[in-house]
């Protein structure tokens, strides 16, 4: 018998669903070739263009997780003999490296950064000039570290050398400013379940004409049929040429989630994410906790915070879930222990949730023997009052 | 504003959802690492084993369409230098050929059959003995033609030569008998939205230990990270090692759909599909329509029927949708015009729906100038009365 507990989702995804998105999931299921559904596909693409801030025709949602979007963004442009430069300062950037390394005869150049900071843009630009890659890949908001990557110089270097700029926006699209066209991004992908607050299962993606042309010039076929962006573009274009059975209800839910974003206004929504992130961080620091990411490069949608010495991060996380039905995330990779990651994402990004996280954390930390320095909730409240 | 029409889904997928499956979609969303969700993953795997009739540990659902399941079934075992033999007598078998042809340095041997018939098993066995492939791929129920592939000799030939038997059960799992272990199938995949009657978006898959060992012996990495079956197996195994954000609500819905199958009883469910297919076919023939697939090889879940000369199959299909909210499918490939495909799948496979299809078709054909030979509904009714 299916009886899931009702969680308050404050991990960096999935985030809670707005009631209208839940409603969309139980709209009547249509066929994937139904004219009504194809109309919704087109409207969904138009809404995605608004959220990506792009005019790219090839803007759609892949029937995959965000990780599938990452793989699509790499396997379509890269072919044997090509080089990719990846800026790697976290778990998800490293996944980009791993995916690229699986490709036949693709050289992978890694520009490393320190977890918690972005990768150095000067080093990225130098690597692009030196290696003249087909692709430069960076992660906009590194969910594992909480750092935000700036874009200074990246697009210019790519245009100078003919490289494509591929950007992971899984943790940021719809929550953190990322004007795709203005930044000169060629392929950008995200996940449905983070700042967009749709259910997990879709990877929104947008592809510039420049990238489409580069893909069209391949000498070898794209090695994946399932992730072939050209085939997906034909499905989403006016001809709607059959490729796969679309996850119709997931698309309905994404359509509704995107409609909510446009109704709220993208700019207001981005400001809302900044506000709640500021309140959360003020609260965590008031408690005496140390934030992990570099203060100048914190992405609003993900807050990384270190567990105090002697405190089991796992026990605290479990207590939040059991006592408060409140989900936050553990760290990843070598920070699996000793770090918490808290999302400020979409419908979950609410004052009530921020105050609850801080109050619950305060109680549980105290019980585990850590004496909070001050009131987290009061410090957050001060931010909201300003 | 999302206002989909309420369709009766009688195309070969998606099929209508049972009310309990719809309910599962709006169960509270949990995180993908939530202990409650991980418990449901394990129960879903156990239910899938019952429906696949297998003891394979590696039994799970990929976060893809059925086509993603196909690609996973091919890219995991095949590596450069390998050969695959594909039995090709329809649109979806041909997709197998196309996916394999994209793989670097894989030889693709095609054993062709005639649309509407299965591929000749003797020819398949000969090709396996001659080419000693890594994989023999066949489609159990060819959705494009309505033919069912028998398995005589296939598993023996594969074991003799060390090949893996890969079977597409997208149109059949949960509706047509396919005991995976008994038939010696090594990798079998399906789609959630056909005879299982869960929403589209997942590809159930099962992998034999023999196939896992063959994959483990690869000299090169699986070229796809997203479709790497080893990584999915680790996510679904007791350790639940993170790979991607599971489409949690789709899994909840699949869990409920599988529970319904087990409650109904697999054997009874398969018989139900046979009964409604027989009634539908009796009705179509009573109307004077010609069934497309070879009488000895018709798969219960998909009925293919030819439009009479002078009748626009497209106009009839559109009228069924507009007047009756009833979806049936057009043909595929060279049969895009002149053929209808009608599903007998899962929750849609009901007497009321069969009678409606026949009655509505009779009305519309008459209006288009075709004089039905007799009453389709009466002929179907006679089958039900027996």
Image (cartoon, coloured by chain):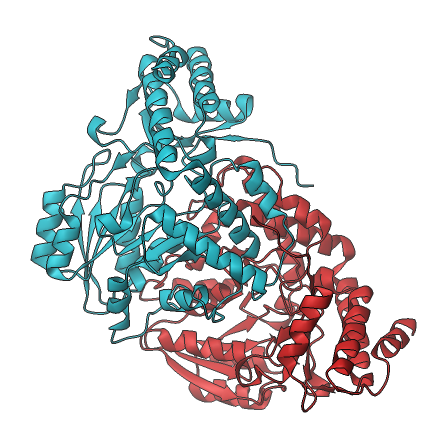
Chain colours: A red, B cyan
The vertical placement of B344 against B54, above or below, is above
> What residue do we see at 60% from left, 83% from top?
A153
Q: Name the quadrant containing residue B106.
A: bottom left
Residue A102 lies, in percent from the top left, at 36, 74
Q: Is residue B282 left or right of residue A230?
A: left
Left or right: A219 as drawn, with respect to B203: left
Position in image of residue A170 (x %, y %): 59, 68
Query: Is residue A172 toward the left or the right of residue A35 in the image?
Result: right
Residue A177 appearing in the image: no
Quadrant into which the C terminus of chain A falls: bottom right
Q: Nearer the viewer, residue B228 or A96?
A: B228
Which residue is more in the foreground, B124 or A10?
Answer: A10
Depicted B341 relative to depicted A350: above or below: above
Looking at the picture, how far across and down is residue B320, in whole percent? 49, 23
Count the marks: 0
Residue in the picture at 58% in, 46% down: B24
Residue B120 percent across, percent down from the top left: 14, 41
Residue at 20% across / 47% down in the picture? Answer: B87
Residue located at (37% from left, 52% from top): B49
* Residue A96 appears anywhere in the view: yes
On screen, A31 above or below A356? above
Q: Quadrant of residue A106?
A: bottom left
The residue most toward the right is A385
């Amino acid at each position: 018998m299916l009886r899931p507990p009702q969680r308050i989702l404050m991990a960096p995804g999935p985030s809670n669903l707005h009631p209208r998105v839940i409603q969309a999931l139980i709209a009547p299921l249509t066929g994937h070739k139904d004219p009504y559904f194809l109309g919704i596909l087109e409207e969904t693409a138009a809404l995605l263009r608004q959220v990506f801030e792009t005019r790219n025709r090839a803007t759609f949602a892949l029937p995959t997780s965000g990780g599938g979007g990452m793989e699509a963004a790499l396997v379509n442009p890269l072919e044997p003999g090509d080089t990719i430069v990846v800026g790697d300062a976290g778990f998800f950037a490293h996944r980009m490296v791993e995916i690229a390394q699986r490709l036949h005869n693709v050289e992978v150049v890694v520009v490393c950064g320190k977890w918690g900071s972005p990768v150095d843009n000067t080093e990225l630009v130098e690597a692009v000039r030196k290696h003249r890659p087909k692709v430069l890949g960076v992660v906009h908001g590194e969910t594992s570290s909480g750092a935000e990557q700036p874009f200074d110089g990246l697009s210019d270097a790519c245009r100078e050398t003919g490289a494509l700029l591929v950007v992971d926006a899984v943790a940021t699209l719809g929550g953190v400013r990322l004007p795709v066209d203005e930044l000169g991004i060629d392929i950008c992908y995200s996940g449905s379940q983070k700042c967009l607050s749709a259910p997990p299962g879709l990877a929104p993606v947008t592809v510039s004409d420049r990238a489409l042309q580069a893909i069209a010039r391949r000498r070898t076929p794209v090695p994946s049929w399932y992730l072939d962006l050209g085939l997906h573009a034909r499905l989403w274009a006016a001809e709607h040429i059959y490729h796969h059975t679309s996850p119709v209800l997931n698309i309905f839910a994404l359509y509704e989630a995107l409609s909510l974003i446009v109704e709220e206004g993208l700019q207001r929504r981005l400001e809302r994410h900044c506000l709640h992130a500021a309140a959360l961080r003020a609260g965590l620091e008031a408690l005496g906790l140390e934030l992990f990411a570099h203060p100048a490069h914190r992405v609003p949608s993900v807050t990384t915070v270190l567990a105090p010495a002697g405190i089991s991060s796992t026990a605290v996380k479990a207590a939040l879930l059991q006592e408060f039905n409140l989900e936050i995330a553990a760290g990843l990779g070598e920070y699996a222990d000793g770090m918490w990651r808290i999302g400020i994402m979409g419908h979950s990004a609410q004052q009530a949730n921020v105050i609850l996280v801080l109050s619950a954390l305060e109680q549980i930390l105290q019980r585990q023997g850590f004496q909070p320095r001050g009131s987290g909730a009061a410090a957050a409240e001060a931010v909201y009052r300003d």
